[in-house]
Structures are given as C-alpha cells and as structure tokens.
Amino acid sequence: MRPSLFSIVSLSGFVLLSGMLIGCDSSKAPRTPAGDPLSSSGYPKVQVIGPQNMWPGERLDSWLFISSPIVTPGTERSMMQVEYPVRSKAVKNIHVQYQFEFFDASGRKLGESGWHFVTLPPRTDTRMNGTALDPAAVDWRLNIKSAE
C-alpha cells in the first residue's frame, strides 16, 4: 500500500512544525556582561568621573597633577584619614568636586565622605581630605568631577 500525497504532505508539515516549536525554546538564560579585565586591586586610587569636558576639546584629567597621598591608618581611637595633594596646571581657577570612598579589607564599600566643592587656583597645590566613618576602613578611592 502506497501512502497518499496528502498523508506525505501532512506528515512532513507536522515534522516541520514540531521542529520549529522545539527550536523556539524561551527558557534561555539572560545575557551576562563580560568580566572586567581590570581587577579591583588594579583600579586607580584617583579617578575623574562624569562629563570631563571643561572647555571644547579639553578634559579635566589633562589639567590635573596628583602627588603621593598621605594616609593615616585607623586605630582603636581614630578613623582612617587620607590627604591627597592635587595641583591644577590651568592658568585660571578650576572648580571641582571630590569625594572619598572607603573600603574594608574584603573590598566592600563602607561609605563615602560626601561631595566637597573646591576651587583649584592656577598652579597651586590644594589638599583634598577625607576621613572614614567606619573603623573597619583600610582602603580608599578619590573621585573628582568638574563643578563647572
């Protein structure tokens, strides 16, 4: 007995439809971003964040010099303190805001100093200061952004 043309077409349509339904699996995992090639320990201690264009074609980070920080570790009686010298190489005042972030020994963020407004006079050393609010603070980061 030979199968009819109708049964062959019906069977192939069923197989094709079944394959399409199986291929439409909607239980796929969500997309995941790539891992950061820069480790936490390699992240810069000082970073310029936010919009950096002060003047057309000029970036804030290109107008700043940084020196070595003065870090006073926390003790049983005092919190960690950081003093960071920053100097402007501009010929006019630069208005910036800065904030310190503090971290524990595991790298967990403990808190922030809050944003401080400061005017950097031309070619003058200015000290940015931060004090941790938690005695567990052993590490820090300084964020600087334009206030212009």
Image (cartoon, grey):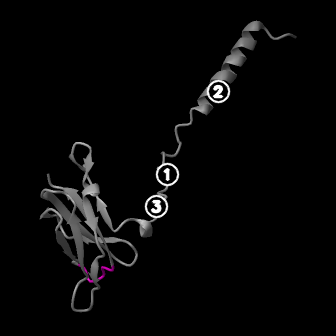
* Camera-nearest label, 2 or 3: 3
**First in sequence: mark 2 vs mark 3:** 2
Considering every residue shown, the one lying at the far right of the view is 1
Range covered by the magenta-colored residues? 134-138
Return the mark for residue 18: 2
Look at 64% across and 27% down and name the residue there: 18
Expressed as whole percent of the image width and height from the top left, the position of residue 78 reads: 21, 88
Q: Is residue 103 magenta?
A: no
Amino acid, disc 1: Ala
Considering every residue shown, the one lying at the far bottom of the view is 76
* Camera-nearest label, 1 or 2: 1
SS at mark 3 in the image: loop
In the image, residue 148 sits, relative to residue 27, either above or below, namely below
Amino acid, disc 2: Ser
SS at mark 1 in the image: loop
Return the mark for residue 38: 3
Amino acid, disc 3: Leu
Expressed as whole percent of the image width and height from the top left, the position of residue 141 reads: 30, 69
Q: Left or right: 24 with respect to 30?
A: right
In the image, residue 49 sits, relative to residue 66, either above or below, namely above
123 and 36: which is toward the camera: 123
Return the mark for residue 34: 1
Asked if the residues shown at circle 2 and circle 3 are in contact, with their CB atoms under 8 angstroms apart, the answer is no
Location of the N terminus (image quadrant): top right
Measure the C-alpha gap from mark 3 to mark 1. 12 Å
**First in sequence: mark 1 vs mark 2:** 2
Look at 23% across and 72% down and name the residue there: 85
Expressed as whole percent of the image width and height from the top left, the position of residue 117 reads: 12, 63
SS at mark 2 in the image: helix
